[in-house]
Image: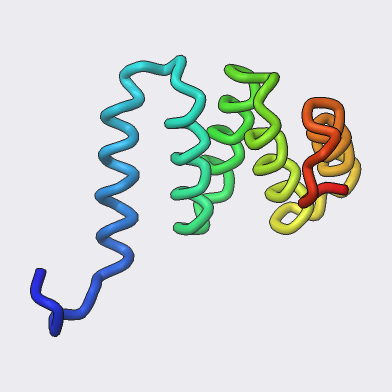
Amino acid sequence: MKADQPVNVASEHEAGIDHLEDFNTHPDCAQSHAELGARYYQKQELEQALKHLLHAVRLEPGNSKHHKSLADFYYTVLSRNDDALAEYLQVLKLDPFDTEVN
């Protein structure tokens, strides 16, 4: 791509999702699910985003970053405050020194 060409962000998100969905032939990769959740959120495909964020947490329940992403999604996107609080509390259990949650 030349520097003076406009960037088509939508097509870049599509390409990223396609690549991650292809990569997802390994369904036990929590990081790919977390990335897919973020990409689907950027496209405002909220059901797909939630599905993948939840799957990342299920695959790596000890990963505080996955719990934080899910908590942020619950709180800011879905206004599910009780679910968000439960996830934020899980983050603190896993990483009591997380400065973004404290």
Q: Nearer the viewer, residue 58 or 66?
A: 66
User: Relative to 83, is 99 above or below?
Assistant: below
**Residue positioned 79% across, 26% down in the render:** 94
The furthest residue to the bottom: 4
- Residue 95: name its quadrant: top right
Question: Which color scheme is applied?
Answer: rainbow
Query: Which residue is outermost to the front?
Result: 97
User: Relative to residue 30, is residue 82 depicted above or below?
Assistant: below
Q: Residue at x 73, y 52 (%)?
A: 78
Closer to us: 51 or 98: 98
**Could you say which is closer to the camera, residue 101 or residue 52?**
101
Q: How many numbered markers are drawn?
A: 0
Instruction: Please give the name of the residue rendered at 51% of the width and 24% of the height, measured from the top-left corner.
Output: 30
In which quadrant will I find the N terminus? bottom left
- At which x and y percent is residue 75? 78, 52
Q: Nearer the viewer, residue 41 or 45?
A: 41
Asked where in the image residue 18 lies, by quadrant, the reply is: top left
* Rendering coords of residue 70 (x, y %): 68, 40
The correct choice, above or below, for 92 with respect to 11 in the image is above
Which residue: 57% across, 27% down? 56
Q: Is residue 76 left or right of residue 83?
A: left
Q: Position of residue 57 (x, y in %)?
A: 64, 26
| Vertical position of residue 61 compared to residue 68: above or below | above
Q: Is residue 31 left or right of residue 22?
A: right
The percent coordinates of residue 17 (x first, y second) are 34, 44
